[in-house]
Image (cartoon, grey):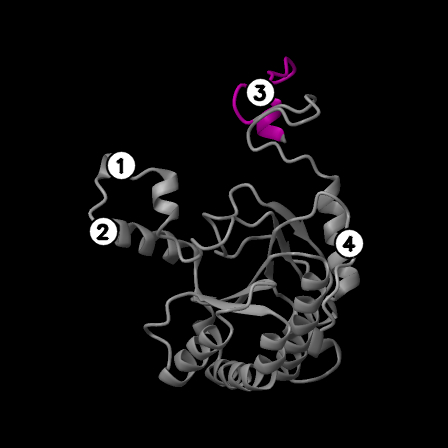
Amino acid sequence: MAKRNLPVPSPAPRHVAIVMDGNGRWARKRLMPRGVGHKAGVDALISVVQACADRGIEYLTVFAFSSENWKRPEEEVSGLMSLLLVALSKHIVKLKADGVRIRVAGDLSTVAEKIRNALLDAEARTKDNSRLTLTVAFNYGGRWDIVQACQKAMLAGVPADKLTESELSRFMAMAYAPDPDLFIRTGGEVRLSNFLLWQSAYAELYFTDCLWPDFDGAEIDKALTVFAARERRFGDVGASGQGEGAVGGAVDSNNDETTAERS
């Protein structure tokens, strides 16, 4: 990818997280096997990595394979594993040359050795890059992440009365990255699906009907435009002073619900 920075709406997110949904439906619409959709999804990912780097986004995290995806048909899972190996082999040199650092978040202890080694090799080969950090969430689940962080904190001897939010965050799988500013899900579904539950507490959520293989730079720009138009309050009244925060929201006399609860 050419190393350039395209103008983006301000403010822009530092960290974008994406649930890449819709590969199977994309293939089905074309009367093709689901595997073809997954292959097209890999091509879309490479395109989106370039688009994010060109727009100055520092961190991109994608849900590549969840801890629940093992429930899929064995043939599909096997195909996904093979596709991962091929994709890493095909694209790692270009990603490294383009300044992309690859990180992996997830439980690799139960993953096949060939897959685990390929992911760890991609991390090692790109560790000196800093243009964009691409985190591949593989065999990952948000609940797993919270549990493993608690376990690590206990093993580290952190006393219960010292286990604050900031302290626990140090043990999360993505402690090296800021929390996502923008959480995108493609494919028309409107749920988090156990992805980055802890980290996305204050992320702006963006859902689109666009199927993942069709998601590109133009779609990224749509999401960035929506993000820039939102007022992020983090429980406060916001910069405009017009919004109501999560704490002490004004009471609506027509019902006993606070405006904060409805926001």
Taking 172 as reference, is 50 left or right?
A: right
Q: Position of residue 246 (x, y in %)?
A: 54, 27
Q: Nearer the viewer, mark 3 or mark 2?
A: 2
Which residue corresponds to mark 2?
A: 156
- Residue at x-position 52% and y-position 47%: 200
Give the label on residue 162, or none: 1
Front residue of this view, candidates 132 and 32:
132
For label 4, the SS is: helix
Q: Position of residue 167 (x, y in %)?
A: 34, 42
Q: Is residue 116 depicted above or below 224 in this figure?
A: below
Task: Give how far apart the Cα atoms at labels 3 and 4 are.
Answer: 31 Å
- Residue at x-position 77% and y-position 54%: 222
First in residue order: circle 3 vs circle 4: 4
First in residue order: circle 1 vs circle 4: 1
Task: Give how far apart the Cα atoms at labels 4 and 2 are.
Answer: 43 Å
Give the label on residue 222, or none: 4
Q: Amino acid at mark 3?
A: Gly
Residues rendered magenta in the picture: 246-262
Task: Give how far apart the Cα atoms at labels 1 and 4 are.
Answer: 42 Å
Give the label on residue 249, or none: 3
Q: Nearer the viewer, mark 3 or mark 4?
A: 4
Q: Amino acid at mark 2?
A: Ala
Q: Is residue 131 depicted above or below 201 in this figure?
A: below
